[in-house]
Image (cartoon, rainbow, N blue to C red):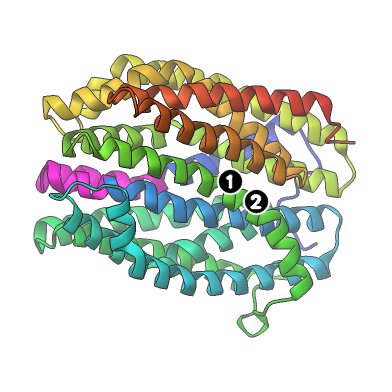
Amino acid sequence: MNGEQALMTEGPIYSRIIRFALPLFLGNLFQQLYNAVDSLIVGNYLGSSALAAVSSSGNLIFLAVGFFNGLSVGGSVLIARYLGARETENVECAVHTSAALGLIFSAVMTVLGVVFAPAVLRMMNTPADVLPESMIYFRIYFCGSLGFVMYNILVGILQGAGDSRHPLHYLIISSLVNVVLDLLFVTGFHMGVGGAAFATCISQLLSTVLALRRLHQMGGPLHLSFRRIRLDPKMAGAILRLGLPSGLQNSIIAFSNVLIQSYINSFGSAAVAGIGSYQKLEGFGFLPVTSFAMAVPSFISQNLGARQPERARSGARFGIICATVMAAGIGLVFSVFGPQMIALFDRSPEVIAFGSGRARIVGPFFALVAYTHMMAATLRGAQRPMVPMVIMLVCWCAVRILVLSVSSLFIHNIAVTYWVYPVTWMLSSAAFTVYYRKEQIFS
């Protein structure tokens, strides 16, 4: 190895994880600014209807972005394992095959997003006064699929190599560009929600170009040569076997949220705007957990590749404890200060009531969702991605759909959509605990 990557197989465990997770936290913070700035500017300059249009597209966008974020885990975990085992040829093959997969999926996602936007938004019962602007935002966003798909793939490569610092730099730059373009397109050129979507697409493409440039300039096995980008069938199969379950897991979560969103839509645009605003806040609040959930798989995979299972186990335990404790504190803040936070997006009393109502109920249970995500991250790092996918499919999708389907026959109360989250978090936490105690995943 030539020092371009930061191996986590040596040195103090806690400081290695924190030093890797901190740039991830800051990077995720700036990434959240993409949608939050859209919502703040749209809500304050274009009104509640436009804010609802952006919010109604949010879960669908998370479904797609979450899938490719999970898919990138396949390449990231493999690269981390090969680096830990010092298998340079496999690292090179995984880097170029990951890039080829990203290009293919970018093209597919662009077509699917543009063609099926109207049908999907109507299936979600998007309010009629919101639908036209939702469709504009959704279609423009997916025209820029190359940006968010390739960025996730390329950053997965860097993170598998232990590099979380450069992705942070790229997100800071692109987020600042996003703020400037949002103000220019929405308030200057009066382009409406389409302007906010254009700003996000351009900013994401910029971060992709920066990540691509970094990999192209690197030496050693992580060097990305444009002429060598091609699919290696065996490596592509290995990446997809690890990445697809993680991508499907993220999509399953998003799919259940899309179904819940269609139920929320039936309560009108104020409910859509209020709960959408809370979801933006929750995205920020969950960043510390996300950072540890991204750091732990690389740490575990590198150390298992280096045949240090006890070190991998200690790192996983540390990450789980840190994320769960932080989430408990963040949830308490949401429960207490929900109304003031929602008012940052929209001062309408009805919008604030919907958003703060969600925050008051789910906040006290925030530690459970953190625990679930950290257990899933631990299993991904140990190359057992099917287990979290199945648990999420049952607990976070099937149970949620069942609860909403049955309850809708008897009551039409938006509180059902609030309580369905804590209930399913409890179930998934219990399932992961039972599996973790039963199986020797670090042996």
Residue extent of the magenta highlight: 30-55
Question: What's the amino acid at mark 1?
Answer: Gln
Q: Which mark is residue 245?
A: 2
Q: Main secondary structure of the magenta part?
A: helix
Q: Residues within 10 Å of mark 1 (few under 14, many from 20)?
A: many
**Residue 258 as seen in the image, left or right of residue 232:** left
Q: Residue at x 71, y 23 (%)?
A: 433
Q: Is residue 366 above or below residue 226?
A: above
Residue 77 position within the rendered picture, expressed as x and y whole percent measured from the top left: 71, 52
| Residue sitting nearer the eye, 191 or 349 | 349
Which residue in the structure is indicated by mark 1? Answer: 249
The answer to whether residue 4 is visible is no
Give me the residue at 41% from left, 73% from top: 111
Q: Are marks 2 and 1 in contact (CB under 8 Å)?
A: yes
The quadrant of the rendering that contains the C terminus is: top right
Residue located 39% across and 57% down the image: 173
Is 44 included in the stretch rendered in magenta? yes
Please tell me which residue lies in front, 79 or 260: 260
